[in-house]
Structure formats: C-alpha cells, structure tokens
C-alpha cells in the first residue's frame, strides 16, 4: 500500500513540475499581449516599445 501511495505522489509531483511555468514567462507573455494591443490601437511603435520595456523591467 505504501509503495502505491509513494508512486502516486511521485507521479503527481512530476506532472506538476512539468506543467508548471515559471512566473517570469507568464509575465513576459502578458507584456507581449499588452504591446500587441497597444500597436493595434494605433499608438506609435516607439511609445508602445517604451511601455513594453517598462513592463519587462517589472518582470525581473
């Protein structure tokens, strides 16, 4: 019984470790989504680029 429980917990932990994404990856993807929305709204690329850089600095 203990071996089955240990194997189940190991498999669960392994699955969670594989599917978990680092926090910085989701932060950078959020910055990219905001940048695309900024460009789509007609704002200049320079202004959107500055906002994206500021957003990415916040990810670190």
Image: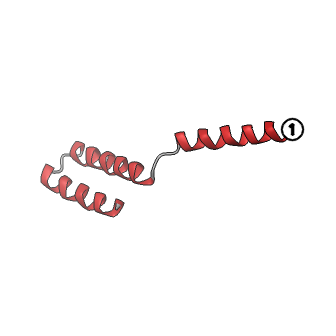
- The x, y position of residue 3, in whole percent, is 80, 38
Residue at 30% across / 59% down in the picture?
Answer: 55
Q: Nearer the viewer, residue 43 or 23?
A: 23
Query: Is 30 displayed left or right of 38 in the figure?
Result: right
Residue at 21% across / 45% down in the picture?
Answer: 39
- The x, y position of residue 43, in whole percent, is 18, 50
Quadrant in the picture for the N terminus: top right
Query: Is 58 displayed left or right of 22 in the figure?
Result: left
Q: Does 3 sit above or below residue 31?
A: above
Reading the image, the residue beneath label 1 is 1
Q: Does 19 sit above or below residue 28?
A: above
Residue at 27% across / 44% down in the picture?
Answer: 36
Mark 1 falls on what kind of element?
loop
Name the image colouring.
secondary structure
Q: Quadrant of residue 14?
A: top right
Query: Is 52 displayed left or right of 17 in the figure?
Result: left
Mark 1 crowdedness (10 Å alpha carbons): few <14, some 14-19, many ≥20: few
Q: Nearer the viewer, residue 1 or 60?
A: 1
């Amino acid at each position: 019984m203990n071996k089955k429980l240990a194997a189940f917990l190991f498999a669960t932990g392994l699955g969670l470790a594989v599917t978990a994404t680092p926090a910085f990856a989701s932060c950078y993807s959020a910055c990219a989504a905001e940048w695309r929305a900024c460009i789509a709204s007609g704002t200049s690329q320079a202004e959107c680029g500055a906002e994206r850089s500021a957003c990415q600095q916040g990810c670190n």
